[in-house]
Image (cartoon, rainbow, N blue to C red):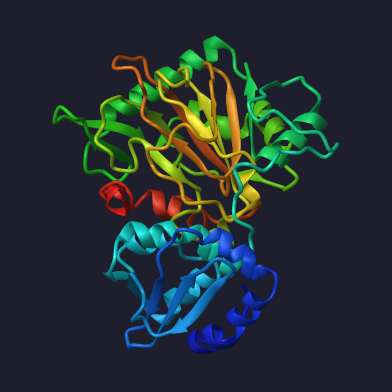
Amino acid sequence: METTEDFDGFHERALPKRLEGDWGAVAARGSSGLPPLAFRLPDGRAYTYVPGKSGVEVVAGDGGAKTVVELDEALWRGLLSSMETPSGLILFQKAKVLSGEVSDFVNWEPALRVLYEGLPPYDPQAPLVGSDGREIDPSTSFHADDDPERMADFLRTAGYILVREVLPSNEVEDLLEAAEALRASARQGEPTSWWGKHQDGRTILTRVINGGSDPRIRSLLRDPRLLKIVRLSDVDLEATDTDVIHVLFKQSGMVFDGKSDNPWHRDCGLGLHKVMCPIMNGSLFLRSANRDAGELRFLPGSWQTAGCSVADQDSEIGVGIEANPGDFALHYGDGMHAGPPPRAKDGPFRSSVVFEFGPPGRRPEEGQEYYDMQMHDIDAGQLR
């Protein structure tokens, strides 16, 4: 929400004025079930958002808030301008939850996007309708030679697309060899790899983020077969030419840390949405992805909304894609997606190369790389 108002002016004039109209009812839907949330500045000034049946009331002070978050005015303005997020403020210790639960603040994120960005809340019951007015099947997959207009419309509507058999098996095997070499050379404590705790006490590598250091993996950024799929987007995007390319190695039995198994999130969920997006992430599958091996799930159509608060353990909602080696999935970073744990005890488990496509000319520090290199020693489980 663009405004020249300061902290007080926004809460006393700009936000109440917006909520007087029809948007008040929209905000009520977006904040339904959430406890009152207050933002307090270090000098004590504070305002509380109180959800109601027909709107959200803005109340001076924080006496009636269940959750009180202290932050400076610049960081609050970062929330307002979609440069900061609740998750990022907590993980990187920029804000303090003085009372209430951290999870309540995190669960407020979609409602804050309704209030601040003017986006509608995600409605999982809403039909997914293509440009021809017909409802589409969100589990549809494609092949590279299918009708590009139909593929583009699906991507535009759902926010993701799965394309089958993009790379042949011999190339996939070569890439898998490169991925395994990176796994073997990874060392715990280095920022180029992420590790997690297994339920049996072992520490296990879950991903490397220096995939671009291998020329075979880095060449995927310029592969015309993948770029053909990227060009289905209505937005002009190009690969971020960097060593920071993720290679995921799913594993069953991991203790939740928010990184080994991904809760529902968006790729700009730690911040920088204003300069990062639109962004798309591509997943090239080196091993199968399914419920047993570890799947990728999406909330269809969520990429053009404020999202919604979803329990981490709720892996039944949305759509799970079943992919084979050589398949390629592409999704908008603003769409909500998750990587729940594999259901099988024994592998092989999902392995995939993940890389980003963003606006032309964007610098690496304006994308996910900015946060990815800081996450190796951070336990995202503290957001629960």
Depth order, front residue of 305/365: 305
Q: In the displayed structure, would residue 94 be above or below residue 7?
A: above
Q: In the displayed structure, would residue 360 be above or below residue 181?
A: below
Would you say 38 lies left or right of 140 here? left
Q: Which residue is found at the position 42% from the left and 31% from the top? A: 247
Q: In the displayed structure, would residue 200 be above or below residue 369?
A: above
Instruction: Farthest residue to the front: give it.
Output: 53
Q: In the displayed structure, would residue 340 be above or below residue 50?
A: above
Instruction: Farthest residue to the right: give it.
Output: 132
Occupied quadrant, residue 133: top right
Instruction: Farthest residue to the top: give it.
Output: 170
Q: Residue 86 appears at what percent x and percent y?
A: 41, 62
Occupied quadrant, residue 211: top left
Q: Which residue is found at the position 53% from the left and 10% from the top? A: 170
Q: Residue 258: tell me if it is visible.
A: yes
Q: Residue 215: tell me if it is visible.
A: no
Would you say 120 lies left or right of 66 here? right
Q: Which residue is found at the position 33% from the left and 73% from the top? A: 68
Q: Residue 237 appears at what percent x and percent y?
A: 67, 46
Task: Count up the numbered dots.
Answer: 0
Depth order, front residue of 22/323: 22
Rendered-image quadrant of the N terminus: bottom right
Depth order, front residue of 174/274: 274
Q: Residue 188 appears at what percent x and percent y?
A: 22, 38
Q: Residue 261 appears at what percent x and percent y?
A: 36, 35
